[in-house]
Image (cartoon, rainbow, N blue to C red):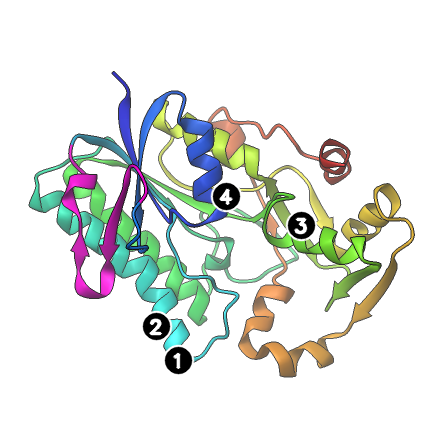
């Protein structure tokens, strides 16, 4: 009989990709905010503190990937939604597990590399200094709320995810799309480090965490390669769209448009994945050039 996994963030690209990867070996359930429920989908509403507890019955693992996009405008209202969709949702999951006396074996929670203080001069490890700004605090609070699951003897893993590269969604998709139509964009500092991981490797790591009990605590999810924004854009041009024109947009032009969100664009770290490798996980794709060969 297959073990049951509950995945939150049912509408997100990562949740869909992870569920496809796991469905052969596990029974997958989803929590969703969409009231039009599909098979194996259950409704929750964090603002009303409502969660259909049928989603949790006999559940052995929870993979918490829900979170309102940080790419939305950072208004006071949106910041509140971003925060609550992460921290309040985690608290609600914990409370409902307690309510029905469920003790999942594993609680895997998304986090972000934005938890760290920005430092492009030194390698950033899982025990490196955390930032003090709003987005760092949100990520830190999210991890604190996930650690509550230790109280019910769940093994807790936090995924400090770098940029997820997939041709189907996110950063890489939109760069490929714009370059297909003739324009590549280098935004802000062309030499800033981009830490990234292939979406397949995120799914592989999550599956490893379900079956290998030595995986515990926070992990920097990033491949071996730190690539500059400039090199990345020119590699796409060289390998796929040689006809496209590269445009450089300096910081002074993006700041009035993005406001505080420019931190996302200008985030510059050198993430270490030493803990990943020490615990026995190796990314299958560690070269952006190789990734482009696979998807082209």
Circles 3 and 1: CB distance less than 8 Å?
A: no
Q: CA distance from mark 3 to mark 2?
A: 28 Å
Q: Return the x and y of residue 294 as percentages of the image width and height.
A: 72, 31
Give the residue pinned by disc 3. Answer: 172
Q: CA distance from mark 3 to mark 1?
A: 29 Å
Q: CA distance from mark 3 to mark 4?
A: 20 Å
Residue 229 visible within the image: yes
Q: How many marks?
A: 4
Residue 132 visible within the image: no
Return the residue nearer the eye: 32 or 116: 32
Give the residue pinned by disc 1. Answer: 76
| Residue located at (41% from left, 21% from top) | 24
Give the residue pinned by disc 4. Answer: 220
Task: Verify whether residue 107 appears in magenta.
Answer: no
In the depicted structure, whether residue 182 falls above or below residue 64: below
Between label 1 and label 4, give the one nearer the viewer. 1
Q: Residue furthest top?
A: 1
Of labels 3 and 4, earlier in sequence is: 3
Circles 1 and 2: CB distance less than 8 Å?
A: yes
- Dividing the picture into quadrants, the one containing residue 155 is top left
In the shown orientation, is residue 172 left or right of residue 68?
right
């Amino acid at each position: 009989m297959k073990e049951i996994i509950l995945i939150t963030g049912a509408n997100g690209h990562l949740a869909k990709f992870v569920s496809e990867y796991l469905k052969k070996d596990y029974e997958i359930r989803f929590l969703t905010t969409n009231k039009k429920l599909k098979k194996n989908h259950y409704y929750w509403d964090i603002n009303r503190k409502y969660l259909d507890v049928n989603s949790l019955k006999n559940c052995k693992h929870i993979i918490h990937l829900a979170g309102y996009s940080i790419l939305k405008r950072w208004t006071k209202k949106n910041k509140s939604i971003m925060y609550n969709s992460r921290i309040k949702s985690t608290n609600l999951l914990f409370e409902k597990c307690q309510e029905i006396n469920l003790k999942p074996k594993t609680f895997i929670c998304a986090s972000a590399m934005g938890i760290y203080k920005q430092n492009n001069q030194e390698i950033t490890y899982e025990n490196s200094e955390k930032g003090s700004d709003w987005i760092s605090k949100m990520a830190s609070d999210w991890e604190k709320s996930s650690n509550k699951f230790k109280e019910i003897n769940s093994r807790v893993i936090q995924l400090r995810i770098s940029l997820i590269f997939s041709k189907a969604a996110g950063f890489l998709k939109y760069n490929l799309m714009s370059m297909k139509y003739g324009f590549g964009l280098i935004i802000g500092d062309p030499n800033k480090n981009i830490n990234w991981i292939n979406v397949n490797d995120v799914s592989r790591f999550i599956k490893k965490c379900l079956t290998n009990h030595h995986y515990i605590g926070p992990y920097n999810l990033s491949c071996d390669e730190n690539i500059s924004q400039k090199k990345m854009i020119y590699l796409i041009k060289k390998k796929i769209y040689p006809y496209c024109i590269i445009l450089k947009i300096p910081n002074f032009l993006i700041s009035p448009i993005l406001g505080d969100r420019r931190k996302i664009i200008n985030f510059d770290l050198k993430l270490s994945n030493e803990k990943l490798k020490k615990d026995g996980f190796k990314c299958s794709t560690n070269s952006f050039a190789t990734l482009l060969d696979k998807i082209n």
